[in-house]
Image (cartoon, rainbow, N blue to C red):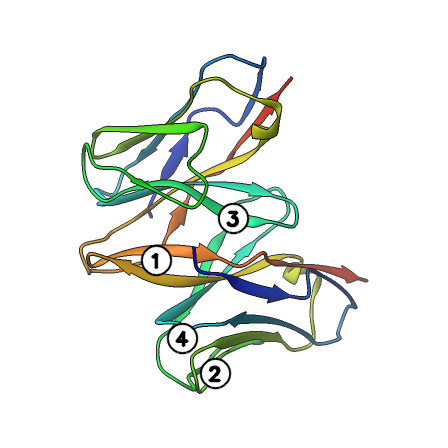
Amino acid sequence: GQQVMQIPQYQHVQEGEDFTTYCNSSTTLSNIQWYKQRPGGHPVFLIQLVKSGEVKKQKRLTFQFGEAKKNSSLHITATQTTDVGTYFCAEVGSNFGNEKLTFGTGTRLTIIP
Amino acid sequence: DVKVTQSSRYLVKRTGEKVFLECVQDMDHENMFWYRQDPGLGLRLIYFSYDVKMKEKGDIPEGYSVSREKKERFSLILESASTNQTSMYLCASSLGGGHGNTIYFGEGSWLTVV
């Protein structure tokens, strides 16, 4: 299946520092979604990016889709303890008009208070 | 709110046992999915279904089968459990039919095969 590489695998930051996770694909992505999974929880949808070069913000979170639609990033400004969790990107593929998601390996964020 | 319910949160099974993981969604979603999650490997798609009695293999279907007899229910079956199937299993659903593709996950089922 489609390979979506996500880096870094782990990130430890001091509370208040910024955090970024990156997704890269060798092929052009149609759409990309981002999910957050809290420790012990299940992945929860954050956002979907569709257009080349698209930038979307949710409070302290900024999501970008590359111009070539081969990469995406999630940036968190001034991390808080509530940001702890694993962040996944997911490529949205189409199968006869129905969506199928292929997930990246995730970036696990821990916050040092 | 969409509710995806997995019947068992924690299971311990013996090698060779047949294991059923049940999943029910209450939003009349067309699409349902089974993923497994392992450290360092992210979420990997096992099987998915776009309609009743329809199933498609995902990226890692070996050792698994599925059943979708009713729209709201999607079952994952391990015909003969093995220790390498110890994992967390996540069921998910989405509206489908070109109307939206946000995926909603259940709480997960932790399976240990001994």
Q: Which mark is residue A66?
A: 2
Instruction: Give SS at disc 1.
Output: loop
Q: Earlier in the sequence, mark 4 or mark 2?
A: 4
Please tell me whether mark 4 or mark 2 is closer to you in this view.
4
Say yes or no: labels 1 and 4 on the same chain: no
Residue occupied by mark 3? B43
Instruction: Give SS at disc 2.
Output: loop
- Against A14, residue B86 (above or below) is above
Name the subunit of mark 2: A
Closer to the camera in the image, A50 or B62: B62
C-alpha separation, residue under disc 1 versus residue under disc 4: 20 Å
Residue occupied by mark 1? B102
Please tell me whether mark 1 or mark 4 is closer to you in this view.
4
- What amino acid is at disc 1? Thr
Left or right of A103 in this view: A98: left
At 50% from the left and 12% from the top, the residue drawn is B17
C-alpha separation, residue under disc 2 versus residue under disc 1: 21 Å
Please tell me whether mark 2 or mark 1 is closer to you in this view.
2
Residue occupied by mark 4? A28
C-alpha separation, residue under disc 2 versus residue under disc 3: 23 Å
Q: Residues within 10 Å of mark 4 (few under 14, many from 20)?
A: few
